Image (cartoon, rainbow, N blue to C red):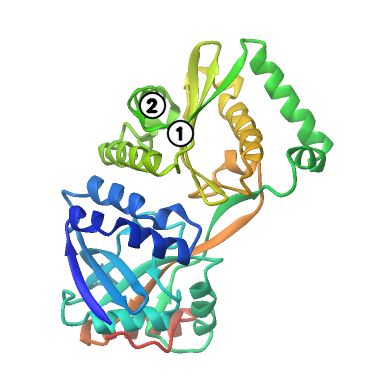
Amino acid sequence: MKIEILDGVDSWASRRDEWNALASECSDDVSLTFEWHQALAVSQAKSEPLRAVWASGDRGAEAILPLRMEKTRLRGVPLRQIGPLGSLYSAHDCLLVRGNSLEALDGVLRAAKGVLPSWDVFRFSVSGDSPIYAEIDALARSGDARLEWSQAKQSPYLPLPGTFDEFWAGLSTKRRTSIRSRVKKFKEQGEPTLRVITQPSEISEVMEIILGIERASWKENEGTSITANPYQVVFYEVLTRELAERGWLRMYLLYLGDRPVAHDIGFRYKNRFFSGKTSFLEELRPLQPGYVLRWMILQDLYAIGVREHDFMGDPDPYKLHWTDAMRDHRDVRWFRQGARAGLVRMLRMGRGKNQGETPSPTRADPT
């Protein structure tokens, strides 16, 4: 296995096609693509070292690990932690490793031992439908304490099988009545229009509209809007432009008459739709523009043949209006041999013995 270190986004960009070929083989998740990582890297440039481990073999790229390197403390012990840059968004897989197994990951880390900075723990995220999740789950029941993972969190998604008419017919009478009522209330104030944005030439204008909606949303005061977080502004500006160039962008604006009142920054990758960020004008909350927007988005997704709506992130109440389907996801800590990592494991095992905890383990022994 050949190991290379690629420093800087420009060096990553020269291998965009190879990167995306491996991402497509590993998953149908847009967050593994080069474009997603490029946007993360640019938005984090001032705080994150932009370094990627590139492992290649006879079949081309075997693994791509754009790494975050940071110092942290765990149970009072200072640790040197590394992990994929994609773990900044932890509700999805962040590993780009052919074979998607601990054995394959271990092989890459061993091969890269001479070029990686010293580390104590490798931290990554994994979702419940990934093969590596089942592998870790099995190991977590076996008693080896070199690996631990967090309590499972859940991220909602909505399967879109069949036709739209079949989807509508499958809803309860109560749900259909609720949808009709909310859409009717909205229409009493003006005609709703859905604008679909896919072209690079539209990005500049539409992002200005979206940032205006974000500033006027409830998220602004909560500190969770795009505009309240400068790095998010950079992330979405870069990401939307790059995905539009690839044909993977599908953003939405909902208009009330000629006024934009709600948005969704979405991405269509393979047969899935990913809702990256959404919001609406707070002053129009009684009209529930976010709900009307989602209903119109679902109709559009059926029209273009999308088979899943991934809400991304946590199970917020507005998402649960539409689905109860969830994917588990967890953060994983994989400890390297060494005194500091061994101390953390010992403290964890001792705490488990004293407090009734069950350690989360693996047989793997990363070097």
The amino acid type of the residue labelled 2 equals Glu
Residue 12, given in percent of the width and then of the height, sits at 24, 58
Q: Quadrant of residue 134?
A: bottom right
- Label 1 to label 2, Cα distance in Å? 8 Å
The answer to whether any part of residue 87 appears in the image is no
Residue at the spot of label 1:
198
Tell me the number on the disc at residue 365. none
Q: Residues within 10 Å of mark 2 (few under 14, many from 20)?
A: few
Q: Which corner quadrant holds the N terminus? A: bottom left
Compared with residue 266, is residue 85 higher up or lower down, i.e. above or below? below
For the image, the number of numbered tags is: 2
Residue at the spot of label 2:
202
Compared with residue 353, is residue 84 higher up or lower down, i.e. above or below? above
The residue drawn where x is 39% and y is 67% is: 95
Compared with residue 334, is residue 304 higher up or lower down, i.e. above or below? above
Residue 181 vs residue 54, the one in the foreground: 54
Q: Could you say whether the residue bearing mark 1 is in a helix, strand or loop?
A: loop
Q: Is residue 286 found left or right of 118 in the rendered image?
A: right
